[in-house]
Amino acid sequence: MYATGKAAQVAKEMSRYSMDILGISECRWTGSDKTKLTTGQTILYSDGKTKNQIDHALIHKKFRTPVRDTRVQRGADVLSDHYLVKTSLKLKLKRPPNTEKSRLRYDVDKLKNKNIREEFCLKLQNRFKLLESVDNDQNTDTIETLSSNLEIAYTDAAKDVLGFRRNKTKPWISQESWTKIHERKEIPKKLIGPKSERLKQRHRDVKKQLKQDKKNWLEAKAKEAEEAARNQHSKTLYSIVKTLTNERPRQSTAIKDKENNIITNSEDRKKRWKEHFNEILNRNEPVNPVIEEEALVEEIDSISTDPPTLEEINKALKSLKNGKAAGVDSIQTELLKSYPELTSSKIKQLLDEVWREERTPHRWRKGLIVKLPKRDDIALLSPTQQHIQQKTDNLVLLSHRTGLRVNPEKCKKLRIYEKNTDKIRVDNATLEDVETFHYLGPVVSKIGGGSKDLQNRLTKARSTFCRLRKLWSSTSVSQHTKIKLYKTLVMPVLMYGFEPWSMTKGDENKIDVFQSRCLRHIFRVKWSDRITNSKVLETVRMETISGIIRKRRWKYIGHIHRKEADSDCITALTWAPEGSRRQGRPKTTWRRMFEKERMTTGWRSWQHARTIALNRDRWRTSGGLMWHVARSG
């Protein structure tokens, strides 16, 4: 192997026989290093100081990353200078490459800058003028031309001014830090000694600046999360959690055919989706369709069929939400709303032609179908088996008359203190009996109460807290920022839908223990430090979560009492059921929990509480007093 051309000859033989890994000997290199051949293979050799290493492993370049360790296994002395070379590899299954190109999105966040937005508007206006001047010289279809100009003008202006959005790996690094990093790279080229004091000082300055950038970025994210939690913008909170945890979206492209077999080929998946939508969207007319009511027909007939006015277009444009996915033309909502006057006028011009010629542009006949796993949650309540079966039959009948179909496999039945065990049937299929199910987020249990839902919220809050564990253990983030993020990202997950919970002392202890563990983990307080939970809460100036829930519950009760006297909420709060309950200790229900807390304050009845609730200031004071009384009790 020390002769010229021998290593290349071995690499050529490996390619000829489709070999990726080869053990070779008599490679009399000295020293400890690795050498890379011109063909891409890498040869590793080591420990040439004590003795020439003549046994090596030749690895193909695509297996260079999986190599974990290479060692020489020295055995008994048999008067040979050869030793066994052992290489450890860790192979991973590779996902097949995605041949479909992802749709590019414009960097619409730049429109928040006033100068960039003005530049985009000017570019857009000039582009429309240029396209209109070209169209005046040619006799083309007016509708197709207006539609084409609208798409070309916005896409060209966005491409030239805004560019495409790219995901940043480290978004907290400021431009000043990037400038210092580039300056640090240039210093070794000007110095002879790379370990000079000037380079070390610049390296320290860069590290200090990066720490400050990350601290400022996290503080800004904490303020943004706090504002989103105050305004109940759950989408913003979830996006902040994904940004802080650096999680990649989990996308599954695997689907099944009618025989329940997984389809892996991309073309076969497209055919299956086409078949699915043809079955769903192209259905036969119902046998006995629902007849429209006369009032509804009159209301439809009274709708104006004139072309949309400029005021209607402006109103529709303002109602569009930002951050939504674009269509086939890749024109996002932010682009249309950046210059509303020009956008409204161009759309008005196009719609007038559509109304006049009574046909639509060819581009409008194409669209994107986004696969969203959603379901319609309909709950049917009834006290008897006969009534619930009758309601189910009526639902199935009306569904057929409107062209819909009830899927029996996705329908569940929950019995609460029901002795009758007869099954509910839908189109000759039996519905499954369950003990719990998710309805619009919360968990509804067979035994009632909120224990199951509380346990579900605790699991999700614990998962959210663990996803941010790198943030809690970071020393570059201040404790003030950590507490802000805990209040805005973790606590809302735990307290979602807490109003119907009927909590016992054990349930309150569970959520308070979770809060104590989280705060102790954030502040790195160990049990050996002998610091009480009340001391930790006093340090961060927080109440217990059970106390916060109790206070907000009574705020919710005050809102109910201020409704009309014949409201369903008032009826549910004051209604007395008929008959007698079972023997034994009564369970802690939602009403019994409030009745107990009400009696501790001296309020004689709910009517007395309603009188106080009509005065908001007095109710706030009484609500705070009630929380302290219930806490001490």
Image: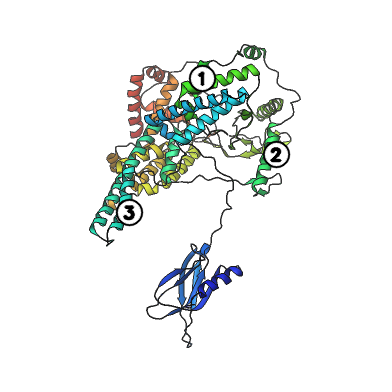
The residue at which mark 1 appears reads as 345
Residue displayed at 57% across by 53% down: 95
Indicate the amino acid at tag 2. Glu
The residue at which mark 3 appears reads as 185
Q: CA distance from mark 2 to mark 1?
A: 40 Å
The dot on residue 275 is 2
Quadrant for residue 432, please give it. Answer: top right
Secondary structure state at the residue bearing disc 2: helix
Residue displayed at 40% across by 73% down: 32
Q: CA distance from mark 3 to mark 1?
A: 52 Å
Residue 307 seen in the figure: yes
Residue 604, given in percent of the width and then of the height, sits at 39, 21
Q: Residue furthest right?
A: 287
Q: Residue furthest front?
A: 137
Of marks 2 and 1, which one's residue comes earlier in the chain?
2
Q: CA distance from mark 3 to mark 2?
A: 57 Å
Of marks 3 and 2, which one's residue comes earlier in the chain?
3
Residue 112, given in percent of the width and then of the height, sits at 40, 31
Front disc: 2 or 1: 1
Secondary structure state at the residue bearing disc 1: helix
Q: Residues within 10 Å of mark 1 (few under 14, many from 20)?
A: some
